[in-house]
Image (tube, rainbow, N blue to C red):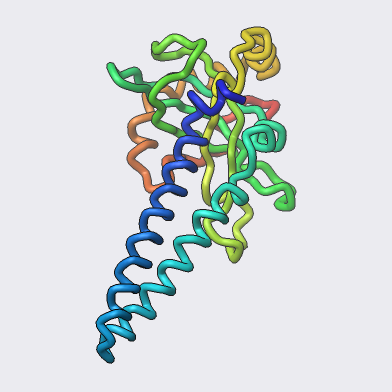
Amino acid sequence: MSHAKSVNQTLAEVRSLRWSAVVVAALCLAVAVWLFYLGRPWSYVVGTVLLVMTATSVWVALWVPRKVGTIEELYHDSPLVPAVVAVARPRGMTLLALVDIAKPESGAHHYALVTRDVAAIPGHRARVGERVPSVAVMSDRTSKNKSEVWQMVSPMPISWGTRDQKVIADATAAIAESEWKLLKDKVAMAERISATNDRRMELEARDLPPELR
């Protein structure tokens, strides 16, 4: 768990969002108190609005970790997917992953290429084509979404959760060679995919190996 806390970028993003919400809540509350102290008609109105914003920010700070789940839950509940280093930079990399973004109840597969920028991946070399077995963390932005595919998809490397090289090697071996080959052939598309709003591109059946069609 200490390893995940120190290197897992997903957890870091959750912590950052929580702290941002806490800071916003504190600022809104402080200004609201000052406005109520002024005792002007307009200051009561603005102060009330800020109190609502305070409550909303507190709710976000409490809701986010519950929405995302624990690191153990993320790795246990998210499907294993292949990912490769598609772009290597002096201070980071871009991963390209193959993910079935369909929801379980859809009854069909919707494969897509998904990218994610990462700072570092312990246990892996920062070179284009490096295989990085991952899990796909998927969710919707709102509970009202009725689409058959997830709105948000993000690959999370197995090595962000463990230092055990056998676990990483077993995960790599569990993914079909045809899926690794597909990613290798699509590496050049990573930057174009990263430029899209959702950082993903759905694939046609003809683009997939036979066993995924």
Please say whether residue 82 is visible from this viewpoint. no
In front here: 181 or 14?
14
How many numbered circles are shown? 0
In front here: 98 or 123?
123
| Residue shown at 70% from the left, 46% from the top | 108
The image quarter containing residue 164 is top right
Q: Is residue 63 above or below residue 99?
A: below
The N terminus: image quadrant: top right
Q: Position of residue 174 (x, y in %)?
A: 70, 17
Q: Is residue 166 above or below residue 140?
A: above
Q: Position of residue 136 (x, y in %)?
A: 59, 35
| Residue shown at 51% from the left, 10% from the top | 123
For residue 183, side relative to residue 48 (left or right)? right
The C terminus: image quadrant: top right
Please say whether residue 192 is visible from this viewpoint. yes
Residue that protrudes farthest toward the front in the picture: 37
| Residue shown at 39% from the left, 30% from the top | 117
For residue 132, side relative to residue 176 (left or right)? left
Q: Is residue 47 above or below residue 56?
A: below
Q: Is residue 84 above or below residue 125?
A: below
For residue 68, side relative to residue 55 (left or right)? right
In front here: 166 or 99?
166
Q: Position of residue 72 (x, y in %)?
A: 68, 32
| Residue shown at 47% from the left, 66% from the top | 56
The image quarter containing residue 87 is top left
Q: Position of residue 126 (x, y in %)?
A: 40, 12
